[in-house]
Amino acid sequence: MDHQLFHIFRNNPLGRETLLQSIYFCSKVGASPVIYIPKHAKFLMYFENDVVQIDLDNSYLTSPETALKHATELVEQGGMKARFLEPKHYTASTLPDIQTNFDFMCCPRSISDLSSKIGLGYIGPRVRRIVESARFPILITSPVYKKWQSIAVFFGGSTNAVNALKLGFRISRVSGLPLDVYTRVEKNSRESYEKVIKDENLEDEMGLYVNKWHFFEKGLFEDNLYEVPHDALVVLGAYGHGLIKTFVFGGKMEKIQSTISNNLLIVGPYYTSTR
Amino acid sequence: MKLTINEVAQCLHLPLSTVERWIRQGRIPIQRNGNDYIFNESALKKWAESYNLMFSLPQKVKAQQQEAILENLLPAMKRGGVYHDLKGDNVEAVLGAAVENLHVLSNSSKEKLFKKLLERENLTSTGIGKGVAIPHPHDPMSDALENPLIATCFLEKPIDFGAVDDKPVFIMFILLSQSIKIHLHLLSRLSFCVRDNSFVEFLKTSPDSAAFFSKVADFEKQLDRADNY
Amino acid sequence: MRILKSWRYPASWNIFRLDDRLLLILMAAIVGNCSGLAAVILNRSLVAMFEWLHHLRHYWWVFVLPAVGAALSSLFLDKVVKEGAGHGVPEVIYSVSRYGGLLRFRSSFSRLISSCLTIGSGGSAGPEAPVVISGASIGSNIAKFFSLNDRQRVTLVGCGAAGAISSIFNAPIAGMVFAIEVIIGEWKSVNIVPIAIASVAGTEVSRILQGNQIAFSHRLFSIDLIDIIACLGLAILTAAASILLTRMLRSIHEISGRISAPVWLRAAAGGCAVGIIGLFLPVVLGEGYHSVRIMIEGTFSQGLAIVALAALAKIVATSLTLGSGGSGGIFAPCLVIGSLVGLTYHHSLVLLWPSVSWVNEGCFALLGMAGLISGMLQAPLTGIFLIVEITGGYEVILPLIIVSAISTTLCHYIEPASYYLKDLVELGHLLRPGTDARVLSDLNVPEILERDCITVNQNMLLRDFINIVKKSHRNYFPVENEETGDFMGIIHLDDIRQYLFNPIMYDAVVLGQIMDTKVEVVHPDDDLSEVLRRMDANRLFSMPVVINNRFIGLISKATLLDQYRKELMVQTSH
């Protein structure tokens, strides 16, 4: 089946890095990129329970006449056929609707702000809302194009984390790249995490796909993160445990995204792994 | 009985994506909470009735699937047995002798079978040419048998069967099946074998059961290969 | 933890699971209160702004005020909230018909502020449409907060709109009828009850905070038959006025769109023009309820010429305000224009037949209002109920119905779509529930895709193909390229039936020779109505679905229509 990755193209060197990353991701995961070259500065995405207005910053609209050419070149260099999205429905004459039935979406860390804010630690509010509502995982790219050679899944034991783990298995299977699992053991013991795996009947997959399950038991979490290889694709769930779980991103997640500069594949609460 | 959402979709004869869409739009009385689906089965049935939608339980689907497995020639032939040197000078005599040999049937069934075989012969001859005949009852005998059987009867001497090519018949395959579908299936496989002249020559040598079955097994393998191209 | 978590998912509570009517009523009350409150806030702010700016009225530069207001409002919408002016009620209807009523949260307050700026400074617009949008957005976001499904959310959007209109006019029935007639588009009891509750809630909020007054009270009218006959003429006149207003709004919007100045400058220019008109005819400024009151009481003592001129001027002013980017609705201007038109008619009747004792001019003002609202919105019931409720004048019901009905019909002849629906209909985006377009828009290609086709490759012999035919359940066989897997064409059994029984051809024919390569394909993102049109045009009953040059399945008309019927049954009955 054809899996699609939605990519909004920025026609400048920064955008080129992001597109190269998307193309690499697609080639490893067996998806094909669908590129949107924006003609208006805003668009709406109607999800199941939310409508998110994405306000693009102006760099997304630069030199539209060369945008098509540049994007096609990059995609064809990656060995794939370029497909472009033309919005069919408009909520208003300058407000197109973009469909949400993709399998992946690629975002930079911020869609509405220019490069000055894409440093570590910042994930823009629009991107957060997309993660909150989307049924697909979001790929947040590192600033520079880097080919990832392994997969690192952060497993915290929550339902979100289990979905992330299943996604990790799938990617490892399709791409053939090694998979490592990282868990920060805090108040609970190692066994409680293993119990979650057993309850979800994932022991076989764990044995099949996982290279090594790392447990961080001491030291600061930020220091532990050094163990994650610099060229790994980090897969993690956006939310954790707790009452306020659907309002803010999980604590671990925030720490991770502000410490490492790898490519992140974030799984939101609506992600269904039934594909 | 707790159904999964996939089973619900099957019961409604709809693709899963349609059911999920209806859940999101609120058109079907099912609530969704992440990956959990909350619904009440009898409420669902009532809802389906009120909207004229089909809601049939999946067991029926399974039962239909079981029927699809049809048997091949070899087991039926082994069940029916191979008989040599059947005595008789005319159609009636050989048919009677053949039926006598079928010990798996009760006496009354044998009588019925004999009558039916004769009826069928009187309709048109079952001699399909090259010296082969395939007597069978016109209606399947579903009450007498559980499994289909083919009785292979080599005649002592070839007799006139009124066959299509007017050649005398030296071998009879009596086909007994519970349904027309099985009958046609076995008949088609058998005719595939008979089409091959080398097979007919082989039969003329009046082989014993082991050699005969192994030859039939070879032909069946060929058939299967062609089917699964 | 469980309990605390599940309070946000009331739809999954046991008592609501089987029948969510109680849940909707509860939600409707909440939504009605909130949207009613929003309407009251807007009303109060308008009154406050009006009073605050009143003392400036005698300065010479007062005509700049509407310009400043319009500019500020469009700047606010564009830069601060980033919403874009002008698209209001049509956006609500679009979202209801296509996305189950999902509206952005910023719409709940942005329009309130921007229309306050536009109207308070003198722009010729009404506060109703912004309040409808705010109410609808409040309803939608409350539904989102409680994770309700599409159908429930649409009902709550309707409740929000109803609560808002009921509150601002102190007219619960008008609110209900407007929400159902215009926003939702279908009269189902599952919608009507919550909307009624919301209307009541909104009205009650308004009464508590602003007191229970009828907006436009009047003396009793005594209507004779002659007046009823005269109404026919009035209906025609109001229809003409509605069409003039619609056309003028359109053209100014287009002119303004072609001028390449920043948005706020265009709005300012429009406002300036309105200000200048307002210097001479102050009746055109603002929402105009005060003037309407005077006209209905029959104390608007101007002659025929002035009144007719005022009507035209108000039409121009409204078009300028709204067409150039100001933020507001057309309800209130319709009321003013309607009264002016009614007065014009009355004066001309008196002029032509001075001997007949026509009913008081206030009555014609009232009827004019109804005619104009019904003509512009093409919602006769809303017009009738609104006028009856805001004037308390039940005795005029007979001529009221006549004027509303005839005005609507005449307008419909010339402008088939109402002001709100015009944009949507032109783009083909209006999907009313239970219509063919709506049902088709819900189905999509991946849902009806059939994947049980056996594929063959172009180098296969006919002999082997026959074995495939034995096993298949279909008449279509897609041909894929042996090496690349690309889709090459289709073999239809009808085309090769004559060769199937000719054994000599079995080894002589390769599939590449008999396949059909000029075949119409469908892409999974294609619109089903388009696909059906192509099927009808080419007399096909199946079409292959190809993506990225790969064959993924077949769609057949039979399955499509089967699904269509199921969809139709689920969407309409009950």
Image (cartoon, coloured by chain):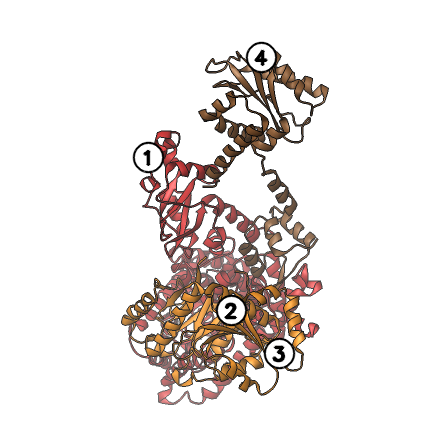
Chain colours: A orange, B brown, C red
Residue under pointer 3: A244
Q: How far separated are the C-alphas under marks 1 and 2?
A: 55 Å
Mark 3 vs 2, N-terminal side:
2
Q: Where in the figure is residue B92, as x and y percent of width and height?
A: 61, 12
Residue under pointer 2: A134
Identify residue type, mark 1.
Answer: Ala
Viewer-side residue, A187 vs C173: A187
Q: In this orientation, does residue C97 appear?
A: yes
Residue at the spot 41% in from the left edge and 43% down from the top edge? C477
Image quadrant containing the N terminus of chain C: bottom right
Q: How far separated are the C-alphas under marks 4 and 1?
A: 44 Å
Chain hosting mark 1: C
Neighbor class of circle 4 (other Cα within 10 Å; few <14, some 14-19, many 20+) is some
Q: Where in the figure is residue B91, as x and y percent of width and height?
A: 58, 12
Residue under pointer 1: C508
Neighbor class of circle 1 (other Cα within 10 Å; few <14, some 14-19, many 20+) is few
Q: Where in the figure is residue C476, as x and y percent of width and height?
A: 42, 42
Mark 2 vs mark 4: tell me if same chain.
Answer: no
Neighbor class of circle 3 (other Cα within 10 Å; few <14, some 14-19, many 20+) is few
Identify residue type, mark 2.
Answer: Ala
Circle nearer the viewer, 4 or 1? 4
Q: How far separated are the C-alphas under marks 2 and 4?
A: 78 Å
Viewer-side residue, A183 vs C101: A183
Chain hosting mark 4: B
Farthest residue to the top: give it: B89
